[in-house]
Amino acid sequence: GAGVSQTPSNKVTEKGKYVELRCDPISGHTALYWYRQSLGQGPEFLIYFQGTGAADDSGLPNDRFFAVRPEGSVSTLKIQRTERGDSAVYLCASSQGGFEETQYFGPGTRLLVL
Amino acid sequence: AQKVTQAQTEISVVEKEDVTLDCVYETRDTTYYLFWYKQPPSGELVFLIRRNSFDEQNEISGRYSWNFQKSTSSFNFTITASQVVDSAVYFCALESYGQNFVFGPGTRLSVLP
């Protein structure tokens, strides 16, 4: 497709379980970003990839969160031992790379941890 | 530190009214970009505009216009003759060189028929 896609659109899991969230960026975009958006708030930065490497992971809240982008395209955000506080919408964005480029967002994955 | 403030949590207007959404930002950098995004009920953030710190010229796009004033660190967004389809949450965002995107808390706009 032409835009950023994310799967699944919704994920319900139990506390303590492991989840993976997938992001497929716009073709040709070298930069990929993950954000977390809690209810009633703006998106908060988690991690930024330039190509295959994580250029900045300073937003990851703790070591339960990890993300990969092995081939420089699709990325997976992984959350171990989920907690109820992890419930949020996880947004992915991509850009052509570089500081001045506009980020284009996917529809998000709504994660609910019971 | 970088910060974006959107003081208006919620705004309600009647269709065809003009409405201005305020955005105030803080950054120590001289090179930065400001953005507005729209988040309709479907949830997907839609890009509206990008403005760099060296271009203070106001911009108009159809019913949308943006007023960038470095002197007051503001980047306000006006919708003229609002329509029901404009109902959404609007986010202002800031990106400085070497820093991450920082979003404001958003303003929820309701346009009533």
Image (tube, coloured by chain):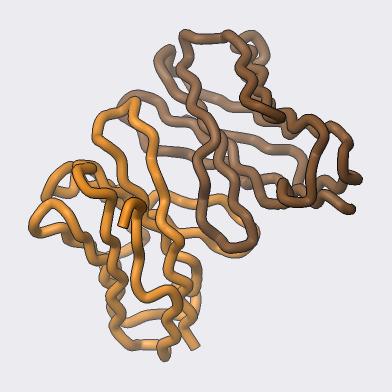
Chain colours: A orange, B brown
In the rendered image, which quarter is residue B13 located in? top right
Residue at 28% across, 68% down: A22
Q: Is residue B75 depicted above or below A36 in this figure?
A: above
Q: Residue at x 50, y 69 (%)?
A: A88
> What residue is rendered at 50% in x and 40% in y?
B47
Q: Residue A6's x, y, as percent?
A: 35, 65
Q: Position of residue A20 (x, y in %)?
A: 28, 75
Picture quadrant where residue B56 is located: top right
Residue A29: horizontal and vertical position, in percent? Answer: 23, 43
Q: Left of A58 or right of it: where is B43?
A: right
The answer to which of A73 and B33 lies nearer the viewer is A73
On screen, residue B4 versus residue A32, left or right, reads right
Residue A9 to residue B7: above or below: below
The residue depicted at 42 percent of the width and 81 percent of the height is: A11
Q: Is residue A40 above or below residue B62?
A: below
User: Could you tell me how many numbered marks the image carries?
Assistant: 0
Horizontal arrangement in the rendering, residue A113 relative to residue B48 (left or right): left
- Asked whether residue B108 appears in the rendered view, the answer is no
**Left or right, residue A1 beside residue A10:** left
Residue A43 seen in this snapshot? yes
Measuring from the top left, give residue A26's x and y in whole percent: 28, 49
State whether residue A13 is above or below residue A58.
below
